[in-house]
């Protein structure tokens, strides 16, 4: 990153949308503006209504622009780890320079070679994370630039996610009038601020408790190795309170924030608070222990699900322990309850920046730090991915086939003709979207749509010398008067609408036969006699 740059992160969450504007100056990240808007159009961390989400993003951006006094055009967007796939990839190239010195171009080429692999159509590449380079058999190299070598290899990890989720995020951001500078996985962003270097190196589990879902991610060797998502979060606690106490969602959310506690054994059954219920004019008294039992039941189910998944992959005893963060973790007693399931080596992370001392901002702050801390090799990898994605996003238009004399034809040296039931059609030889094709070296034949041949047409016949100024293909007509029953063609024929009868003459494309066998001629003669 340059010495001075503005970085804007966009965290699209189920409960709220957070925008953080940071200024990176002399290796220091300073927060200059924060925007927070209630989220609409999301469910369980996934966009379900694009228009509602776009409106929420625009409101959060406007809020951050007023606070920071800057115009926001480009953002770093967080991607949830739903159905994330992490695959190993390998690439190998020969060093291109004459003096065999490895440059950034060689690093770019080997990263591109590593990404040449089959990806299912329903998935999309999010990022590629280089792990180590190998120069002429010497492994463990983090940055090979400046070294001398003949063969350069790369081992990396390819991160892919559901195309639907990524497409919807990109569509919402672009419809909000913004450009995407980077896609950052949310667990990676959290790790950049919630974990120190040793915790990222030796292995730590991050539990992100959001409003719509809870994710457990393993960071080891400074890389994201595993991620699990439970489709339950803080909103489910609110819904449980609303259903059991027969109150509205807004009232349940307020009760949870003001009176909620996650461990029922540490509450008193003698403390009461009023609850406005549906169908009653007077509020109902509810004790704190009863409310705490409702909250504890849902959180217990979430922690048990995560523990079972981590035990299945033997990830309960990592040296770094567990780090708890996310908006739902701010509820009092959550840390004590989580220690019952994950042991005493559990801590909670809360950002320390002024105005952001709430775990709901952990992901937003992490994206800013992650982009600021990227080394040159990872920047090359991400820029390579973005450039390839931009090239694939712009597809060349397929040339329009020639339908009549008013279209300027393109006459390649070799034309493919495809039969489509009623006519043959010119098309690009590289276009395989029309199915099986017949290859020939001449232009398709056009004939008049009449049963008795062109001699009965009321249209006027133009020779080549009388052709209009516009460019046309070569047109041919069938000469039925040929006594040898061999097809005879004349070039440069063009028919126009008859001026006296105002009847339009239509045209039909047919295949121009080449040298045929005797059997073919007999069959053609039979059908010609039949039509006569």
Image: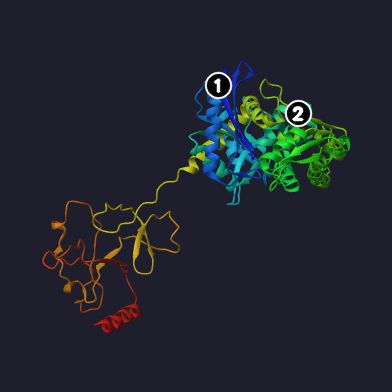
- Identify the residue shown where x is 48% and y is 34%: 177
| Image position of 381 (left or right of 323) | left
Question: Closest to the observer: 465 or 174?
Answer: 174
| Image position of 478 (left or right of 63) | left
- Identify the residue shown where x is 30% and y is 67%: 512
Secondary structure state at the residue bearing disc 2: loop
Q: Residues within 10 Å of mark 2 (few under 14, many from 20)?
A: many
Measured as percent of width and height from the top left, residue 476 is found at 24, 65
Measured as percent of width and height from the top left, residue 106 is found at 58, 32
Measured as percent of width and height from the top left, residue 255 is found at 73, 37
Instruction: Reply above or below: 471 against 190.
Output: below
Mark 1 to mark 2: distance in Å?
Answer: 25 Å
Instruction: Give the quadrant of the C terminus.
Output: bottom left
Q: Residues within 10 Å of mark 1 (few under 14, many from 20)?
A: some
* Residue of label 2: 349
* Quadrant of the rendered image containing residue 413: bottom left
Question: Closest to the observer: 230 or 170?
Answer: 230
Measured as percent of width and height from the top left, residue 442 is found at 31, 60
Secondary structure state at the residue bearing disc 1: helix
Q: Is residue 200 visible?
A: yes
Question: Closest to the observer: 264 or 163?
Answer: 264
* Residue of label 1: 68
């Amino acid at each position: 990153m340059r010495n001075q740059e503005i970085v804007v992160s966009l965290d699209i969450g189920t409960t709220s949308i957070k925008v953080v504007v940071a200024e990176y100056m002399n290796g220091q990240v300073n927060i200059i503006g924060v925007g927070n808007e209630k989220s609409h159009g999301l469910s369980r961390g996934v966009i379900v209504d694009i228009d509602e989400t776009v409106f929420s993003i625009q409101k959060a951006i406007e809020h951050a622009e007023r606070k920071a006094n800057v115009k926001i055009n480009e953002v770093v967007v967080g991607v949830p780890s739903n159905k994330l796939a992490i695959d190993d990839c390998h690439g190998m190239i020969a060093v291109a320079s004459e003096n065999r010195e490895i440059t950034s171009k060689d690093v770019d080429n080997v990263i591109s070679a590593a990404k040449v692999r089959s990806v299912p159509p329903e998935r999309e590449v999010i990022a590629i994370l280089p792990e180590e380079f190998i120069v002429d058999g010497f492994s463990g190299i983090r940055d090979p630039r400046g070294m001398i070598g003949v063969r350069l290899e790369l081992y990396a990890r390819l991160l892919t996610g559901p195309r639907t989720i990524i497409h919807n995020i990109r569509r919402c951001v672009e419809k909000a009038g913004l450009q995407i500078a980077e896609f950052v996985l949310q667990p990676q962003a959290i790790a950049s601020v919630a974990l120190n270097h040793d915790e990222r190196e030796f292995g730590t589990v991050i539990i992100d408790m959001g409003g719509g879902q809870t994710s457990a991610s393993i960071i080891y060797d400074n890389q994201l190795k595993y991620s699990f998502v439970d489709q339950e979060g803080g909103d489910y606690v609110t819904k449980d309170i609303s259903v059991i106490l027969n109150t509205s969602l807004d009232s349940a959310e307020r009760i949870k924030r003001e009176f909620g506690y996650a461990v029922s054994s540490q509450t008193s059954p003698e403390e009461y608070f009023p609850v406005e219920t549906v169908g009653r004019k007077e509020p109902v008294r509810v004790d704190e222990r009863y409310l705490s039992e409702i909250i504890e039941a849902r959180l217990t189910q979430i922690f048990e699900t995560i523990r079972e998944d981590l035990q299945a992959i033997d990830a309960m005893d990592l040296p770094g322990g567990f780090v708890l963060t996310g908006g739902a973790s701010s509820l009092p007693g959550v840390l004590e309850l989580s220690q019952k399931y994950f042991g005493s080596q559990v801590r909670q992370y809360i950002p320390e920046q002024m105005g952001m001392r709430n775990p709901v901002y952990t992901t937003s702050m992490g994206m800013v730090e992650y982009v600021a801390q990227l080394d040159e090799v990872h920047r090359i990898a991400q820029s390579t991915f973005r450039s390839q994605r931009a090239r694939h996003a712009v597809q060349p238009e397929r040339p329009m086939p020639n339908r009549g004399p008013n279209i300027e034809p393109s006459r390649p040296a070799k034309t493919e003709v495809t039969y489509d039931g009623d006519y043959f059609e010119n098309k690009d030889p590289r276009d395989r979207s029309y199915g099986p094709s017949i290859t020939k070296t001449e232009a398709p034949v056009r004939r008049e749509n009449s049963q008795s041949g062109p001699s009965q047409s009321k249209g006027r016949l133009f020779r080549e010398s009388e052709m209009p100024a516009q460019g046309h293909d070569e047109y041919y007509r069938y000469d039925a008067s040929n006594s040898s029953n061999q097809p005879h063609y004349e070039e440069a024929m063009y028919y126009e609408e008859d001026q006296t009868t105002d009847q339009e003459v239509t045209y039909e494309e047919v295949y121009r036969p080449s040298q045929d066998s005797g059997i073919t001629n007999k069959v053609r003669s039979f059908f010609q006699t039949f039509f006569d």
